[in-house]
Image (cartoon, rainbow, N blue to C red):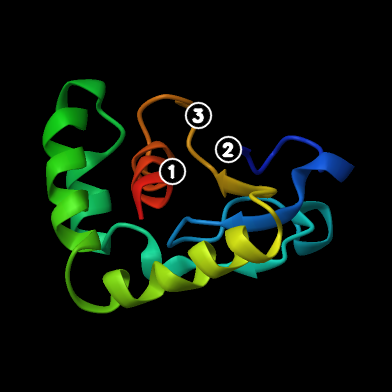
Amino acid sequence: MKRIYEEAQEDDGTRILVDRVWPRVSREKAKLDLWMKEVAPSDELRKWYGHEKERFGEFRRRYLAELTSGIQKKELERPNKMIDENDGNVTLLYGAKDEKHNQAEVLKKVLEDF
């Protein structure tokens, strides 16, 4: 996992953006292999959370519920397949400033247990 604003490194492997909204970075600098906006939290949940740390526990609970139903559940198969194809060498990218309280942190744990 890393912020999309950090420089891409060779050891990043497959770079997957897991934000629903495109961050303020050029596509060239992002050096993405895949943008998975469908697996990101819904707009409704993202706006409710607002990156307020005190809401993170409830955000995690609600996001996990989203990840176990609908299109988000189906979309989880794509990064999991890429992880398998690249011997686990995949980097989840996100735009949030907080490195511990964001959707990529929740998604990483889900993918590890998938």
Query: Residue drawn at (50%, 29%), measured in percent from left and top?
Result: 97
The amino acid at mark 1 is Lys
Earlier along the polypeptide chain: callout 3 or callout 2?
2
Q: Say which quarter of the image contains residue 73.
A: bottom left
| Residue hosting label 3 | 97
**Residue 16 visible to the viewer:** yes
The residue mark sitting in front, 3 or 1, is 1
> Which is nearer the eye, 34 or 96?
34
Q: Position of residue 66 (x, y in %)?
A: 19, 61
Query: Residue drawn at (57%, 48%), measured in percent from left and top?
Result: 92
| Residue hosting label 2 | 1
The residue mark sitting in front, 3 or 2, is 2
Q: Position of residue 18 (x, y in %)?
A: 49, 56
Query: Residue drawn at (19%, 63%), measured in percent from left and top?
Result: 68
Helix, strand or loop for disc 3: loop
Mark 2 touches mark 1? (CB < 8 Å): yes
> Which is nearer the eye, 79 or 5?
79
**Residue 9 visible to the viewer:** no
Residue 108 has which mark? 1
Q: Is residue 49 above or below residue 81?
A: above
Q: Position of residue 71 (x, y in %)?
A: 28, 78
The amino acid at mark 3 is Lys
Q: Is residue 8 above or below residue 44?
A: above
Which image quadrant: the C terminus?
bottom left
What distance separates the C-alpha of mark 3 from that of mark 2? 13 Å
